[in-house]
Amino acid sequence: MSFLDRFLSGSKSKAEATGALSAPLKGRVVPLEQVPDAAFSGKILGDGIAIEPSEGLLVSPVNGEVVQIFRTNHAVGFLSDDGVEVLLHIGIDTVKMNGEGFRAHVKAGDKVKAGDKLVEFDLDLVRAKAKSTITPIVVTNMDAIASVETLRSGEVAHGQDLLRVTPKKA
Amino acid sequence: MEKTVRILNDEGFHARPAGVFVKKASEFTSTIEVKAGEVTKNGKSIMALMSLGLAKDAEITIKAQGPDEAAAVDACVDLVNKKFQA
């Protein structure tokens, strides 16, 4: 990104400049360390937080672009307008459900705003078939990130500020 | 330096494999790329690798360029062959 691009993106709204990710799910906030999958709890995929959902609706946590939606519609990757890469992974071991119970509303390359509907899923089916419904929200480009701060604990609703991600200075 | 391998694990090149691969690739100073079909992605980026959307049995070419390229390619190939069990 050139200096001019940085300057121009820096002049966008203040809300975006703080790099806050909003909650993509309604439910209970769970520390990443308590996710029952070592790839997430060990932060191999990056730092972040998790939510145990109480509703089967996933919305975008950022303004940005959908980089990837896995073919089974249970995982979505983003690049935010602030340069933060975010991975949302609905439940644990849900890849084995082969897409059953998941309906995507976006595809790779789509531009999204925070709060846009991404995936609807059958929460009861995930409870019955997967190892856990706990959904990790992780920043995957940690080499470009100075800090990831959790802004909330306990119950959270769609769209409430959840994480503050501060990119490294250029 | 490059080598071609087939993905053997059932889940394909999904989240955990991508995380494990990037961790291994990042141990080397060489640039590492993963090519699938006509698409080439940075082997040190989790999101880039996941965006390839590779399933079991997909063939990929791992390319490295730099002072430790031979060791880098061998280590990455070995990881794929071991189904990403680091």
Image: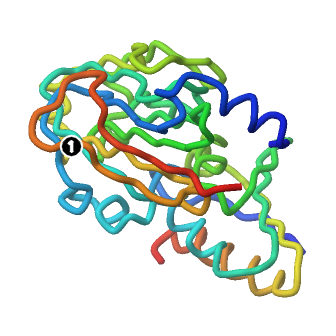
Between A118 and A126, which is closer to the camera in this rendering?
A118
Residue A110: horizontal and vertical position, in percent? 62, 18
Q: Secondary structure at mark 1?
A: loop
Q: Position of residue A101 (x, y in %)?
A: 28, 21
In what quadrant of the picture does the N terminus of chain B appear?
A: bottom right
Residue at the spot 83% in from the left edge and 71% down from the top edge: B64
Give whichever of B16, A153 is nearer the camera. Answer: A153
Q: Nearer the viewer, residue A162 or A18?
A: A18
Q: Is residue A60 above or below residue B66?
A: above
Name the residue rendered at 71%, 81% in the picture. B28
Residue B16 x/y as whole percent: 45, 58
Quick check: A97 left or right of A75?
Answer: left
Vertical placement of residue B84 versus A55, above or below: below
Instruction: Tell me if residue B43 comes above or below residue A154 in the rendering.
Output: below
Q: How is the image coloured?
A: rainbow
- What chain letter is assigned to the residue under label 1? A
Give the residue drawn at x 61%, y 31%.
Answer: A81
Q: State left or right for residue A115 relative to residue B52.
A: left
Q: Is residue A39 left or right of residue A83?
A: left
Q: Residue at x 51, y 29 (%)?
A: A16
Q: Amino acid at mark 1?
A: Ile
Disc 1 designates what residue? A134
